[in-house]
């Protein structure tokens, strides 16, 4: 077989050529009633597009990338780069000899009943150049890897006969230079392929404008594919079963009467829906709209179905308004990703993504950095999300050259306009984004100009334009949408009096590894500073690919069920950059999401859930608890509550809560549900808020938030001294039957990704904090009490540490002091570390929990009595690092099933971690599957622990969360049970 003659034109190095023979994009969904062509196709992978086809055929599954399938003779594996192109060629060129090109071929029986109809092939998405051939004849080509390409096959096929369809997909092209997003590089067909048929006269496009007022305008474009147009044809619309055409006013400028007759072009249905149920992300009310093209005899020639929502989006001054409300954007950046299939995602998977996001308080999605699968938008409409729809343009490595390169002008306008044409009818889409990280040039302005004329109903954003001057009024962005801007800069801008447009960060709070420190601080500022409206966390997924450690290949589609709770089954792991043998790669930077590759939420999700709480405890006054409704549109009737009173020296008591009837923004005082005696230890009141009925995204009883208030402070508990002594060894180290390593000073943690990429880890290693050498200076016994002074030497100097061990009833009290000279201005922690015997497998504590929390990420972990098996305390971040900490721990017990064990009481709420790993165990391996758990527990309790921040990409934690030099003192009591 010859290859495609279109290939002779070398379209993969011609950026001016964006398509050939491709039909215009439109919003008519052709999926239902189509002939699906998904499944196994004959396949061969050529080394380059101009190599001859002729080798042996194997099979590839469609939709799917070949890089994730074990295909005979196809050895092209995933490769991860962030900014860098994986090859040296400058735009528009790509490697001449190494340009994997997949040839997909299959036969299709064209249904006989399609005689006389127009027959169209739709390829859902292919990256990065698609060429279509039917029975050896060239049909067309397309670029733009994340949008569908339709080709009219009517002249190429005969109904009732068999046709051979060949799809050639070239991996590297001029288009790759503008698809340089921070993600895995793949190759193949990533969305469904189908064949559909229409009447020769068909609905070519439908544009819906549904306003908050109830006004509805439906513009229909009717096309004649066959030549002469029959007389008497007309269009009707039906909204939730009600015929619109009967009471709709037709646009008189376009048509003579209700009938379209002989008119090729626009038909407008225009009506106002009385008592309209409006759409917003909290109450996403949808209507079903069917637009029908009728033949003269009233039979239906074509139908287009849309679920529409009535809502307004506008910018007034510096506020972004939805239905007139200044809504907060609690967003996340989302890629189309799956650990088994790469970029191919199913409707059920997308639904699971969005359901999870709803359950954790998110209300917005930026489709980073390309139009997502069409199903995503249907789900966002239905479940309620505000979507920033982003065009497939990221020229990152060559941003500056490309933004003004006229050879790429077509591509910019093509990609932005095709996205708008596809997604314009979705109520969820509130903003168009021109792309990501591509500098700012004339090509952007051209695309923005097209959008402003075509869809004046939505704002445009583009970070690359707005970053030059947040206060500008004449660039391609209606929103100042910085990425990773320091919070103080955002606040200062909002207070400056210079702000001209809303400020919504397109990326912030980088979720790589153990991260998202200061999220609560960000939201405290956003909610209290007019002009700030939120942002989009980077990002939803950890893009770990499930990989077989033995053969190094992706497990692929058959891997369902081979992972659980964020952890891959034995022999498998979550691969990140470099794991497929790539020499050019960006390592674990691909694992920077708030969920693991199997969608298990990371602890940061609980932080977000609480920050987004729809109902909150404002404060506690004499008359009772002040509750507030923090939503924009909804009352509290969809929520139910239960009070929990956690007493430090007692149990947890519960009482039913009746939530008041509050409109958004209102507060009310509700009586305190418990009698709390004035005396006693700490008392915390939690309102456990759940869904009171089934929501589309949560069954009744799903936890929504856990707001909390302290009712009573801690009272000091004096420990009675014992007439015994404490046993220490010659080095002054505590001897205790349950400890295998005595408490010593710890100043280091296994660096988090933020610590590594932010430069802290390097500094700590240079200071020698990871390998301090302890030397006993003195051991003094005095009346049963032992005072041990030791020095811990690194390269920066010596840290003096003193322990006073006093026998107390049932155990020993340890008063500690460590003095850090001024050079130690930013260490990971100051605290004690010890190790226990095996068998103490349950941790129970009073403090914040139950999930992992850190000093700057603890707003979502309520104080209470918690109990978690030791093996479940650790969070399996893809690259092992500090993990499993619990903030604000007052006391804890580590016990064996026979109730033996030890208990620790702390002088103040402290950061504690109990894991199976020493810090150096975690740093000695690169992947979680390589960790060997120890039999006993490694226990850290810290006088001070550094915040997490987000320095892997963006601001570090705030100075208030750093560990300051000077004298640190802490005390704790260790008892056996
Ligand atoms: C920014 C990118 O937009 C995003 O795709 C991702 O790479 C993120 O950073 C980090 O994970 S760009 C960065 C250079 C600020």
Image (cartoon, rainbow, N blue to C red):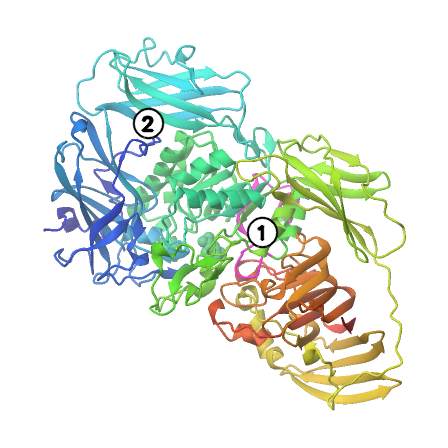
Which of the pair 431/813 is nearer the observer? 813
Tag of residue 205: 2
Q: Does ligand 1 reach within 8 Å of label 1's beta carbon? A: no
Whether residue 506 is in magenta: the answer is: yes
Residue span colored magenta: 491-516
Q: Nearer the viewer, residue 737 or 293?
A: 737
| Percent position of residue 520, x then y | 65, 51
Q: Position of residue 662 (x, y in %)?
A: 71, 31
User: Mark on residue 264?
Assistant: none
Question: Relative to residue 666, is residue 118 drawn left or right?
Answer: left
**Residue 30's image quarter?**
top left
Q: Indicate if the residue with disc 2 has its beta carbon within 8 Å of ligand 1.
A: no
Q: Residues within 10 Å of mark 2 (few under 14, many from 20)?
A: many
Task: Report which quarter residue 899 is drawn in.
Answer: bottom right
Q: Which residue is mark 1?
A: 605
Sequence-first tag of 1 and 2: 2
The quarter in which the C terminus is drawn is bottom right
Determine whether, in the image, residue 882 is placed left or right of residue 963. left
Residue 850 in view, yes or no: yes
In this rendering, position of residue 679 left or right of residue 843? right
Residue at left offset 53%, top offset 63%: 876
């Amino acid at each position: 077989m010859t290859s495609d003659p279109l290939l002779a034109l070398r379209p993969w190095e011609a950026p001016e050529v964006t398509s050939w023979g491709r039909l215009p994009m439109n919003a008519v969904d052709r999926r239902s009633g189509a002939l699906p062509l998904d499944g196994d196709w004959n396949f061969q992978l050529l080394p380059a597009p101009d190599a001859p086809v002729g080798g042996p055929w194997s099979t590839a599954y469609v939709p799917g990338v070949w890089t994730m399938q074990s295909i005979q003779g196809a050895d092209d594996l995933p490769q991860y780069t962030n900014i860098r192109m994986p090859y040296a060629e400058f735009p528009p060129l790509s490697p001449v000899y190494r340009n994997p090109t997949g040839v997909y071929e299959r036969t299709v029986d064209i249904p006989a009943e399609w005689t006389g109809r127009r027959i169209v092939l739709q390829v859902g998405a292919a990256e990065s150049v698609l060429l279509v051939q039917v029975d050896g004849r060239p049909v067309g080509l397309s670029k733009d890897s994340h949008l569908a390409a339709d080709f009219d096959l009517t002249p190429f096929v005969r109904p009732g006969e068999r046709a051979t369809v060949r799809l050639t997909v070239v991996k590297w092209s001029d288009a790759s230079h503008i698809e340089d997003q921070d993600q895995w590089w793949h190759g193949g067909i990533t969305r469904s392929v189908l064949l559909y048929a229409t009447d020769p006269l068909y609905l070519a496009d439908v544009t819906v404008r549904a306003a908050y007022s109830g006004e509805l305008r439906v513009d229909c474009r009717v096309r004649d594919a066959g030549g002469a147009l029959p007389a008497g044809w007309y269009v009707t619309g039906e909204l939730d079963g009600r015929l619109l055409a009967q009471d709709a006013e037709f646009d008189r400028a376009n048509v003579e009467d209700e009938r379209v007759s002989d008119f090729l072009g626009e038909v407008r249905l225009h009506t106002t829906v009385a008592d309209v149920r409006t759409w917003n992300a909290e109450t996403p009310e949808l209507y079903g709209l069917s637009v029908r093209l009728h033949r003269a005899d009233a039979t239906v020639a074509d139908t287009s179905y849309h679920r529409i929502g009535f809502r307004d989006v506008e910018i007034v001054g510096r506020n972004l308004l939805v239905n007139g409300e200044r809504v907060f954007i609690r967003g996340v950046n989302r890629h189309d990703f799956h650990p088994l299939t790469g970029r191919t995602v199913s409707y059920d998977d997308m639904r699971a993504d969005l359901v999870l996001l709803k359950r954790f308080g998110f209300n917005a999605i930026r489709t980073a950095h390309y139009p997502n699968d069409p199903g995503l938008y249907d789900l966002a409409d239905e479940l309620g999300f505000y979507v920033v729809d982003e065009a497939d343009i990221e020229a990152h490595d060559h941003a500056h050259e490309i933004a003004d390169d006229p050879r790429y002008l077509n591509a910019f306008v093509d990609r932005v306009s095709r996205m708008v044409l596809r997604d314009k009818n979705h109520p969820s889409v509130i903003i168009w984004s021109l792309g990501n990280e591509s500098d700012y040039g004339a090509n952007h302005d051209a695309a923005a100009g097209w959008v402003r004329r075509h869809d004046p109903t939505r704002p445009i954003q583009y970070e690359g334009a707005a970053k030059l001057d947040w206060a500008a009024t004449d660039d391609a962005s209606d929103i100042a949408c910085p990425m990773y801007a320091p919070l103080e800069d955002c606040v200062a801008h909002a207070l400056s009096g210079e702000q001209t447009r809303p400020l919504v960060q397109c990326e912030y709070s980088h979720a790589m590894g153990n991260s998202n420190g200061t999220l609560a601080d960000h939201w405290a500022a956003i909610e209290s500073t007019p002009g700030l409206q939120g942002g989009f966390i980077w990002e939803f997924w950890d893009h770990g690919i499930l990989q077989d450690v033995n053969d190094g290949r992706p497990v692929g589609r058959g891997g369902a069920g081979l992972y659980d709770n964020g952890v891959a089954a034995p022999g498998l792991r979550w691969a990140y950059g470099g794991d497929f043998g790539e020499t050019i790669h960006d390592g674990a930077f691909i694992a920077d999401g708030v969920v693991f590759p199997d969608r298990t939420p990371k602890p940061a999700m609980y932080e977000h859930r609480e920050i987004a709480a729809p109902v909150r405890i404002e404060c506690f006054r004499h008359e009772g608890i002040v509750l507030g409704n923090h939503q924009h549109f909804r009352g509290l009737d969809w929520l139910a509550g239960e009070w929990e009173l956690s007493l430090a020296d007692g149990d947890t008591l519960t009482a039913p809560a009746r939530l008041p009837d509050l409109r958004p923004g209102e507060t009310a005082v509700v009586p305190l549900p418990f009698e709390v005696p004035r005396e006693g230890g700490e008392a915390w009141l939690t309102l456990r808020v759940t869904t009171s009925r089934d929501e589309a995204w949560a069954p009744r009883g799903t936890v929504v938030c856990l707001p909390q208030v302290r009712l009573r402070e801690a009272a000091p508990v004096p420990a009675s001294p014992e007439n015994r002594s404490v046993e220490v060894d010659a080095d002054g180290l505590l001897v205790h039957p349950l400890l295998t390593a005595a408490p010593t000073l710890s100043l280091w943690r296994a660096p988090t990704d933020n610590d590594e990429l932010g430069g802290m880890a390097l500094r700590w290693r240079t200071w020698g904090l990871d390998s301090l050498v302890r030397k006993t200076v003195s051991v003094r016994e005095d009346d049963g009490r032992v005072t041990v002074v030791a020095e811990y030497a690194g390269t920066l100097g010596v840290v003096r540490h003193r322990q006073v061990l006093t026998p107390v009833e049932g155990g020993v009290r340890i008063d500690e002091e460590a003095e850090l000279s001024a050079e130690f201005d930013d260490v990971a922690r100051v605290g004690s570390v010890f190790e226990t015997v095996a068998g103490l497998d349950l941790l129970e504590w009073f403090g914040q929990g139950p999930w992992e929390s850190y000093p700057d990420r603890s707003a979502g972990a309520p104080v209470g009595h918690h109990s978690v098996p030791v093996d479940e305390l650790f969070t399996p971040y893809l690259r092992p690092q500090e993990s499993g900490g619990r903030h604000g721990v007052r006391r804890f017990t580590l016990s064996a099933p026979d109730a033996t064990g030890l208990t620790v009481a702390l002088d103040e709420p402290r950061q504690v971690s109990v894991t199976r790993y020493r810090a150096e165990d975690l740093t000695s391996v690169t992947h979680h599957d390589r960790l060997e758990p120890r039999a006993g527990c490694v226990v850290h309790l810290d006088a001070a622990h550094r915040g997490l921040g987000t320095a892997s990409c963006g601001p570090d934690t705030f100075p208030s969360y750093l560990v300051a030099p000077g004298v640190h003192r802490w005390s704790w009591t260790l008892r056996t049970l």
